[in-house]
Image (cartoon, rainbow, N blue to C red):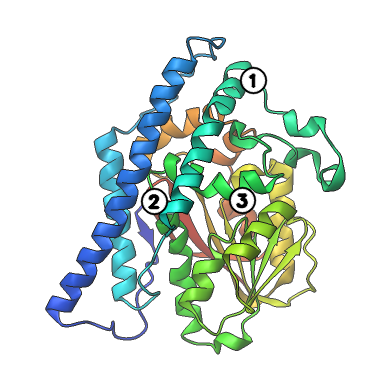
Amino acid sequence: MSEVENKISPSRKSRRLPPLLSLARRTRYAFHQGSRVALYTLHSEAMRRMNRQLQKELPSAPNVKPNGPVPSQRRMLGDIAKLFSEDMKSVEDGHYPMPSDGTMSPRELFNTSRAFFQDVPEVARRRATGAHQEVNEDLSGFASKLPRYYRQNFHFQTDGWLSEESARIYDFQVDVLFSGATAAMRRRALVPLAQLLRRRDQRSLAYVDLACGTGGLLGPALKAFPRLKGIGLDLSEPYLTVARKRLKSHRATYVTALAEELPFADSSLDVVSSVFLFHELPSKVRRLVISEVARVLKPGGSFLFVDSLQTGDVPDYDGLLSVFPQLFHEPYFTSYLEEDLAGLCAGRGLEQRWMTSAFLSRAVQFVKLR
């Protein structure tokens, strides 16, 4: 697969700064992203050392062997640098403003880091013993109404998706996994959105972000497009509670609902986005979600999709992808790797118009045919 199919280019001239200001902006971006990579790489290394000590007291976890090539750390850092370069180019092309990923006060950083390390032994215990159903043992409150596939300790994390404590450290955990590159991968979805909004009044666009979590894409979208309104939809009430606290904007509203049973009328939305949702869904539910997306989109509307790479997208990563579901309890990930998403979407009238790989993710724009 080529790196980019039907590459999106700016529809207006980029707002070029004088050379010195451009250099200063690039330097500021490089320092910010470099600091994030260093922060999360240090946490990753500390976590590995903790796990080595914990393994001495825990049962031996199953031996996991990759089914294909695994990239070196040098290759992965090179691909992160490439992602950041593309991210910076999108800023220079006027797709979205300079990002300020995950900015935290020293106190917030300390508390989040402490909570992260407190959970490391629990994650190690679940991985070693195969315990990934703890959240299903207590079905009190809202959890009893959730679908069975959702009530699991995904990633072996404490409380799965079912507590505010989980929500508060989830993005930090993911950034440790992806070396601080998560937000830049998500922002690939803003490139086609920016193109759409150059032809539309932002105030008139009906936009929903599926499985919005704590607002990882919805927040940057509303920041990038100051007249855009958006609806964040998720199954987890605790995660939506944290999203409301983090994104205090009258332009953001939230709905607790299933992605496979969207509470929107036929042909009522201009844009639907989805970030890191589909690899968490059983194959049959993926089909239902795609059908629902096709139903609620207006003719000509866009489905903006960001999720993990699939087998063959970047062959050098195939082995790493094959071990991921075992290391992090992703029960539906293996089937996702081989899913013909373009074919499934085409069968429901959603045509693939653009695609690019971005480090460990793929970003795609599907358009509903008229």
For residue 189, say whether it is visible: yes
Which numbered tag is attached to residue 130? 1
| Residue at mark 2 to residue at mark 3: CA–CA distance | 17 Å
For residue 370, say whether it is visible: no
Query: Where's residue 174, x and y in %?
Result: 49, 44
Tell me if mark 2 has few (under 14), some (14-19) or many (20+) residues whose alpha carbon lies within 10 angstroms of its own.
Answer: many
Q: Identify the residue at the far left of this view.
A: 20
Find residue 3 and report its image quarter. bottom left
Image: 308 above or below 330 = below
164 with respect to 169 (left or right): right
Query: Would you name the residue on which mark 2 appears?
Result: 181
Query: Where's residue 201, x and y in %?
Result: 55, 90
Image: 132 above or below 351 = above
Q: Identify the residue at the far bottom of this view.
A: 201
Query: Which one is in front in this view, the residue at disc 2 or the one at disc 3?
Result: 2
Mark 3: which amino acid? Leu
Which numbered tag is attached to residue 278? none
Query: Would you name the residue on which mark 3 appears?
Result: 277
Query: Where's residue 2, x and y in %?
Result: 35, 53
Mark 1: which amino acid? Gly
Tell me if mark 1 has few (under 14), some (14-19) or many (20+) residues whose alpha carbon lies within 10 angstroms of its own.
Answer: some
Disc 2 secondary structure class:
loop
Query: Which one is in front in this view, the residue at disc 1 or the one at disc 3?
Result: 1
**Quick one: quadrant of the C terminus?**
bottom right
Mark 2: which amino acid? Ala
Query: Where's residue 279, x and y in %?
Result: 59, 44
> Residue sitting at 61 percent across and 35 percent down?
157
Image: 258 above or below 340 = below
299 with respect to 321 (left or right): right
Tell me if mark 3 has few (under 14), some (14-19) or many (20+) residues whose alpha carbon lies within 10 angstroms of its own.
Answer: some
> Residue sitting at 43 percent across and 62 percent down?
188
